[in-house]
Structure formats: structure tokens, C-alpha cells
Amino acid sequence: MAHALHDWNIQILYPADFKEVLAVWEAAVRATHDFLPASAIETFKPLILNEYLHMVDLRGARSPSGALMGFLGAAEDSLEMLFLHPCYFGQGLGRALVQFAIEALGVAKVDVNEQNKGAVGFYLHLGFKVVGRSPLDAQGNPYPILHLKLS
């Protein structure tokens, strides 16, 4: 797996990268979170940019041309965010980012929107197991969250 990690060039992201991170986040959310109304996405954008990105160890993978392809944010032993630009879905980047988070950052847990079936299947495929469920998201909205842990 080390070879794949090297191929993706995973690096630390800084506040100067946040606008690009937000653009990748928005593209990914619009492609995968069809249960979220556009107004919810707009509500989340300033929170992501001004609060959430500052609260995590942020790493990203860039293309040879320097474009941000995807990123992860970890805090303690939790994967708090993982988003890929839709152009890079299905190419192994998500797996490489999660593997990096596990091996380099000590990640063992992740919360995922229950309605994001692709993400749920992705994490289950990588060896996570559902250990709990919350009927509301962290903001109190009716988007159920599954709590997963590495088995």
C-alpha cells in the first residue's frame, strides 16, 4: 500500500488552500449528497471554510498539475471529513486517503450520513463496521448519521 500512497502525493494542507478545499468539498457534496437541499449546502459552506477546516489535521492529494483531487480531515482517532472531486471517484484515491489516515494519523472511527449509500458501502468495504446510529446530524438536522469503527 505504501506505493499507492506515494503515487497520490498526500500532503499537509494549509489555510491558503482552504478555498480550493471548499471547492472540492462542494463538488463532492453536490455529486453524492442528493438528500441535501441546495440551501443546506450553502449554509455549510461558511462553516466548513471558517470553522471546520481549522479543527482538523487536513491532508490532500494533488494531481501532477497541482490541482487538489481530494482531501481528508482527521481529529484524534476520527476521520472527520473525506471528500474527492467527482473526477477522481472510483480510481483508488479515497482508499489511499483512508489508508493514510489509518496508518499515519491513527484513525479508527468515522461518522457517515446514512443516506449517502456510496460512502457507507465504501467504508464497510474498507473494514469499518457500524457501531451506532444517531437520528440527527451534529447540527440537529434530520440526516441520520452512522457511527463506524475499524474492526
Image (cartoon, helix red, strand yellow):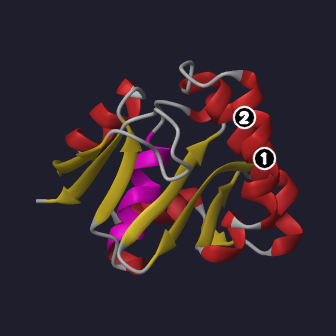
Residue 110 at what x, y percent from top left? 35, 57
Residue at figure coordinates x 34%, y 71% from the top left: 107
Where, by quadrant of the figure, is residue 18 drawn?
A: bottom right
Q: Nearer the viewer, residue 4 or 140?
A: 140
State the CA–CA distance, disc 2 to disc 1: 6 Å
Q: Magenta region's main secondary structure?
A: helix
Which residue is situated farthest in the left direction here? 151
28 relative to 52, above or below: above
The quarter in which the N terminus is drawn is bottom left
Inspect the magenta stretch and tell me whether residue 101 lies in it: yes
Q: Quadrant of the C terminus?
A: bottom left
User: Label 2: how many residues lie within 10 Å, few (<14), some (14-19) or many (20+)?
Assistant: some
Q: Is residue 47 visible?
A: yes
Point out the stretch of residues depicted in magenta: 92-102
Instruction: Please tell me how crowded label 1 is: few (under 14), some (14-19), or many (20+) other residues with Cα within 10 Å.
Output: some
Name the residue beneath numbered marker 2: 41
> Mark 2 is on which residue type?
Ile
Where is mark 1, residue-wise? 45
In the visual, does 90 lie left or right of 132? right
Q: 84 or 139, which is in the foreground?
A: 139
Q: Quadrant of residue 16?
A: bottom right
Residue at coordinates 45% horizontally, 33% vertically from top-left? 143
Instruction: Name the secondary structure under disc 1.
Output: helix
Q: Which mark is residue 138?
A: none
Residue extending furthest toward the front? 140
Q: Residue at x 27, y 68 (%)?
A: 108
Q: Are the residues tagged 2 and 1 within 8 Å (C-beta)?
A: yes
